[in-house]
Amino acid sequence: MRIARPPGPHGVLLYAGLLASGSPTDYLTRVAARHPRVAHLRLGREHVYVLGHPDLVHELFVVHGRSTRKGRALERIRILLGDGLLTSEGELHRTQRGRIQPAMHGGRVAAYAETMVAAALEHDARWRILSGAGPAAEGTADTPVGGAVDTPVGGPVGATANAPAPATVDMAEEMSGLTLTIVGRALFGSDLRELAKPVAESLGVLLRGFQRHVLPGSDLLLRLPTRRRAGLFAAVDRLDLLVRQLIDQRRAAPPGPDLLSALLTSIDDNSLVRDEVMTLLLAGHETTATALTWTWWLLSEHPEVATWLHEEVDGYDRDDLSSADLERLPRTRAVFAEALRLYPPSWILGRRTLVDLELDGWTLPAGSLCVASQWVLHRDPRFWNAPLEFRPQRWITREGRWDEAAPGQPRAAYLPFGIGSRICVGLAFAWMEGVLVLATLARRWAAQTLPDQVVAVRPAVTLRPRNGIRMSLHQR
């Protein structure tokens, strides 16, 4: 029986664009502009429905959430994550979420604040050494937390002749190293600073090649003995070895309050523990690192916003920030929220229907792939005033408080951490980490993007900057 389907573009254009390392974010933006509610396109044998309106996103992901399963992206990333929380389904997913959720909510998350701030202060001490600004704080390792650092060049605007020269760093590597340190201590009870470089390199290989492997026919690509395939699986093997070593080390140590200890106590199967740790390693540091990287870049591009932020953090005379301070830092939270809006690390969501569903007057047969893009929804002029402008003030109420509803956007127009039953279990952890790290470092540092640098997005598993972001660090 022939099924009526909504109009939409030719799917071959998306397929060709992705294979040519084009821009799926631009493509999906054009689709939503021409088909503002729902569009249909064909990718090989796949029937894909692109949802462009928040009402439909809420209906599919929340109202009909139990009638769907994960989409193609999460299906493909199983080669790395196995049956971890992001990729599992049904009863296994509910069991896993039940194990992890207590460590990501309430008092347990609040207790991680000290770890987050301590790691940020250590990073501050390291940046001081790189800039020649002073000795490291006591207990700070000499080993770089992020990536390689260039020889200091130039100097801050208005600096005196005796002022230290700024160091030049790749902010993406810096934030990756910092958040890896935090997730290692908070969730795994381990110091992962020495693993920052190998983890970043292996994840880079995987994320750069990921676009090709979410396409129809990618199963065949993964079977062909190509150099790209060999590099992909070598990166998986390197990460797998690092994670298994981490598990063995934690199992040999006395139990502690960290999440990995709890997992080792409750799960006998080492493979399942491995899958959970791999998932937490990726989701627990990659997404926040990416969000913080874009935040620093946006502040550099908008000095008036940086001044607005500094007025808050400079007037808040505390180095021992805690979870209670989130309410006292509305501007910092607004800056992070706005960065998540413009550059959401998780930029696309997908679900596959398990049964025939009615959506917006159309029948979506069982097995249909439905996608919605945070990138598109967060920048849609129907739902946001001046959607392409970096305006953190939109998140502040007249009373000066941060409020997620302050911009007046409809439900499901802002979903940086997903939506429905599979919303990010670490949402509270990520919010607190982003705000506390930013407040701690922005009191002490301003970062300026190096001139003549092309900053572009790489939409893969996360929305990374394509070639990192080179920035100079200026002590404030």
Image (cartoon, rainbow, N blue to C red):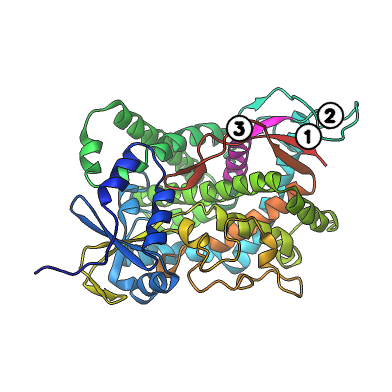
**Element under disc 2:** loop
State yes or no: discs 1 and 2 in contact (Cβ < 8 Å).
no
Residue 128 is tagged as: 1
> Circle 2 is placed at which residue position?
164
**Element under disc 1:** helix
Q: Which numbered disc flags the more N-terminal residue, 2 or 3?
A: 2
Indicate left or right for 140 with 208 as reference: right
- Amino acid marked by disc 1: Arg
- The residue lying at 34 percent from left, 51 percent from top is 73
Which quarter of the rendered picture does the N terminus lie within?
A: bottom left
The x, y position of residue 296, in whole percent, is 66, 45
- Amino acid marked by disc 3: Gln
The x, y position of residue 236, in whole percent, is 37, 37
Q: What stretch is highlighted in magenta?
A: 167-181
> Circle 3 is placed at which residue position?
453
- Residue 39 visible? The answer is yes
Q: Is residue 438 above or below residue 89?
A: above
Q: Is residue 66 above or below residue 386?
A: below
Q: What's the CA distance linking mark 2 and mark 3?
A: 24 Å
